[in-house]
Image (spheres, rainbow, N blue to C red):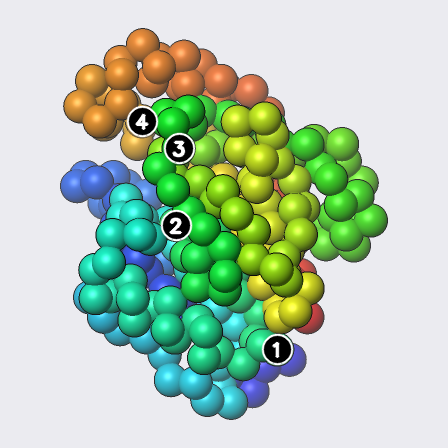
Amino acid sequence: MMRTDDYIAILETGIPPAGLDATYGSYADMFSTLLAGEGRAFRVFKTLAGELPPHDAQLKGVVITGSPAGVYEGDPWIIALMEWLRALDTQTPVVGICFGHQVMAQAWGGHVEKSPKGWGVGLHEYNVQAHDLWQTLAGKGAQTIACAVTHQDQVVKLPDNAIVLAGSEFTPHGAIYYTGRKGLSFQCHPEFCEDFASELLISRRGIRIDAALVDQAVETLKRPSHRHDLLGAISKFLTV
């Protein structure tokens, strides 16, 4: 049970396109709703605007959201976030999603690039590689996990203290677990429901992403996903 002044920080590094937030809420809203639990408190930090939590005893966990930014772009807020991550107590649980997944890897010794494979969109399936670990995290075994994705950038080099939890031919480092500190990250978006993931892609159709690719991706999102298994694993990880 968390004390009344303890909290989990949600570092908001991006916002949904105009209009979608009115229907689905912000990325921080999604996480605070989906990860809500008895005695669990969240505080949102507008990291995109330079806000970061203090490194103090009340900080009991961190969730880093997705963002359209690239971790290699050198914006001051990105540099500050990576420095903050390097200075964070190694026993503080950190969860990263998409951009969060990438910035954790970049900050802790890995490398991220814009992939020559192009956009990864729709429902992607990752092969579980660390089966015992996934069993522990999710409370169930699985050979594959399927979840919505939307990204161009990828982690191409792992930090020394990281192992691949799950991945695919398209995204070899799709899920990462850190052994030298408490870190867990996913390239996919378990916080996205099917409708939001579809509308997000449609908003980029023919603008940022090829129309035909978007149409194919939206069809894949109608298939069952394992997003709630991932959210359960994240919630358990933050509790521990």
Q: Amino acid at mark 2?
A: Phe
Q: Position of residue 134 (x, y in %)?
A: 74, 48
Q: Secondary structure at mark 1?
A: loop
Q: Amino acid at mark 3?
A: Ser
How far is the residue under mark 4 from the one under mark 1? 36 Å
Residue at 28%, 44% (x, y): give it: 68
Query: From this viewpoint, which residue is outermost toward the top?
Result: 212
Q: Any mark on residue 99, and which?
A: 2
Q: Amino acid at mark 1?
A: Gln
How far is the residue under mark 1 from the one under mark 2? 22 Å
Instruction: Point out the tag, 4 or 1, that comes first from the N-terminus.
Output: 1
Residue at 37%, 73% (x, y): give it: 83
Q: Any mark on residue 143, and which?
A: none
Q: Any mark on residue 91, and which?
A: 1
How far is the residue under mark 3 from the one under mark 2? 14 Å
Q: From the image, tell me which residue sits under label 4.
A: 201
Instruction: Point out the tag, 4 or 3, that comes first from the N-terminus.
Output: 3
Residue 163 appears in view: yes
